[in-house]
Image (cartoon, grey):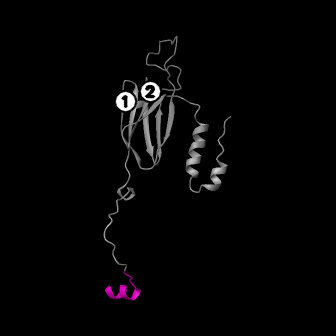
């Protein structure tokens, strides 16, 4: 089993625990590849996740967005019963289309939100947008003539009020 050891980095990098935990968790849970998916980048701050969910209807799917986590779940109605289909008299000779439920988790960066989701031709698309708050954006500082420094003492502050 491949285990990533971030101990040397944890000793010298303070505040990065969440990133190391995410990488270690992803290494542990990367064995299930169902359903297959793509992640695309559209421009500077737009992303799209596309999952192949053949056989699932929109009512069978649930998308939950929490802070920094997107969870996509698929559950077929009547899952767990022996029938599996609407025709009780039918006998399945070959099952090649996956009918099992699934849960797929995606870790999201700060300020990434779900813009919309759609299901078409067996593909579930989830559009994500990163919206950084105005206060967090870099600001250009104008360079002007050098102004003299002024010192305000406590006595002057109380007299001005």
Q: Quadrant of residue 30?
A: top right
- Measured as percent of width and height from the top left, residue 14 is found at 59, 57
**Residue furthest out toward the right:** 1
Element marked by disc 2: loop
Q: Along the polypeptide, which appears first: circle 2 or circle 1?
A: 2
Q: Quadrant of the C terminus?
A: bottom left
- Measured as percent of width and height from the top left, residue 55 is found at 43, 23
Residue placed most toward the observer, 145 or 29: 145
Element marked by disc 1: strand
Residue placed most toward the observer, 116 or 79: 116
- Measured as percent of width and height from the top left, residue 53 is found at 44, 27
Task: Evaluate if marks 2 and 1 touch, with contact meaning CB atoms under 8 Å apart.
Answer: yes
- Mark number, residue 62: none
Residue placed most toward the observer, 4 or 95: 4
Q: From the viewer's perspective, is residue 6 above or below residue 103? A: below
Q: Which residue position holds label 2?
A: 53
**Residue furthest out toward the front:** 145
68 with respect to 12 (left or right): left
75 with respect to 29 (left or right): left
Q: Kindly identify the residue that appears in the image at 36 percent across and 87 percent down.
A: 156
Local crowd size for mark 1, using a 10 Å CA cut-off: few (<14), some (14–19), many (≥20): some
Give the magenta-colored segment's residue range.
Answer: 150-161
- Mark number, residue 119: 1
Is residue 130 highlighted in magenta? no
Local crowd size for mark 2, using a 10 Å CA cut-off: few (<14), some (14–19), many (≥20): many
Q: Kindly identify the residue that appears in the image at 38 percent across and 30 percent down.
A: 58
Q: From the viewer's perspective, is residue 98 above or below residue 73? A: above
Q: Disc 2 versus disc 1: distance between alpha carbons?
A: 9 Å
Mark count: 2
Is residue 153 highlighted in magenta? yes
């Amino acid at each position: 089993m491949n285990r990533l050891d971030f101990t040397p980095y944890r000793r010298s990098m303070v505040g990065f625990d969440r990133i190391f935990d995410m990488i270690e968790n992803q290494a542990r849970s990367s064995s299930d590849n169902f359903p297959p998916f793509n992640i695309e980048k559209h421009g500077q701050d737009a992303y799209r996740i596309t999952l192949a969910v053949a056989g699932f209807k929109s009512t069978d799917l649930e998308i939950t967005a929490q802070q920094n986590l997107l969870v996509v779940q698929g559950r077929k109605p009547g899952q767990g019963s022996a029938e599996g289909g609407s025709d009780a008299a039918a006998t399945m000779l070959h099952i090649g289309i996956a009918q099992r439920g699934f849960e797929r988790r995606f870790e999201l960066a700060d300020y990434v939100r779900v813009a919309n989701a759609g299901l078409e031709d067996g593909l579930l698309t989830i559009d994500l947008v990163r919206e950084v708050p105005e206060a967090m954006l870099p600001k250009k500082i104008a360079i002007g003539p050098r102004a003299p420094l002024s010192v305000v003492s406590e006595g002057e502050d109380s007299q001005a009020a």
